[in-house]
Image (cartoon, rainbow, N blue to C red):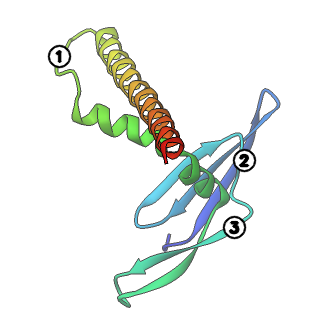
Amino acid sequence: MEQGHSMEFVGNYNDVEMSVTAWKDNKTVILASTFAGEKPLGKVMRYDKKTKNRVEIIRPHVIEEYNKHMKGVDLLESIIARHKILMKSKKWYMTIFFHLLDLVIVYAWLQYKIVETDKKSKNKKKSNEFKKIQI
């Protein structure tokens, strides 16, 4: 497959339509979805090493939707990768337990950051209102 080419396979399971789309970007990307499929096709700019220029290639709709909504998942996974619990176990369920513990700790920290940011922004608004009244 050359860059920009995509293929879609559609099937039904328990009356739910599922689409599996393979798209060639720099590497092959495969996504399965019950929400979006290959169509409507969009366009995206990529750098071509051969011509050393930016070219426009075709991108499936499912890739566009994934890129639009992936921010939280990628952030969570990248933080877990950097701050992972380094305990190994021969028991498969302990590996899953440690991964879930990583998820809970990172998610709690992210929620804490959101709450603290909201508190700081509310305090700034209050202090700005107070300063306006004094003038």
Q: Nearer the viewer, residue 35 or 28?
A: 35
Mark 2, Cα crowd under 10 Å, few <14 / some 14-19 / many 20+, is some
Q: Measure the C-alpha gap from mark 3 to mark 1.
A: 45 Å
Q: Nearer the viewer, residue 128 or 10?
A: 128
Which residue lies under the disc numbered 3?
Answer: 41
Pointer 3 or 1: first along the chain = 3
> At 57% across and 70% down in the image, what residue appears?
5
Amino acid type assigned to the residue bearing label 2 in the image? Val
Please state the horizontal and vertical placement of residue 40, each as a whole percent of the image.
74, 63
Please state the horizontal and vertical placement of residue 26, each as a whole percent of the image.
40, 67
Which residue lies under the disc numbered 1?
Answer: 87
**Residue 13 picture quarter:** top right
Instruction: Classify residue 119 as left or right of residue 89.
Output: right
> At 39% across and 40% down in the image, what residue appears?
75
The vertical placement of 10 against 121, above or below, is below
**Residue 114 picture quarter:** top left
Please state the horizontal and vertical placement of residue 69, each as a whole percent of the image.
57, 46
Amino acid type assigned to the residue bearing label 3 in the image? Leu
The vertical placement of 24 against 95, above or below, is below
Would you say the residues marked 3 and 1 are in contact, meaning their CB atoms lie under 8 Å apart?
Answer: no
Pointer 1 or 2: first along the chain = 2
Which residue lies under the disc numbered 2?
Answer: 10
Please state the horizontal and vertical placement of residue 35, each as a whole percent of the image.
71, 43
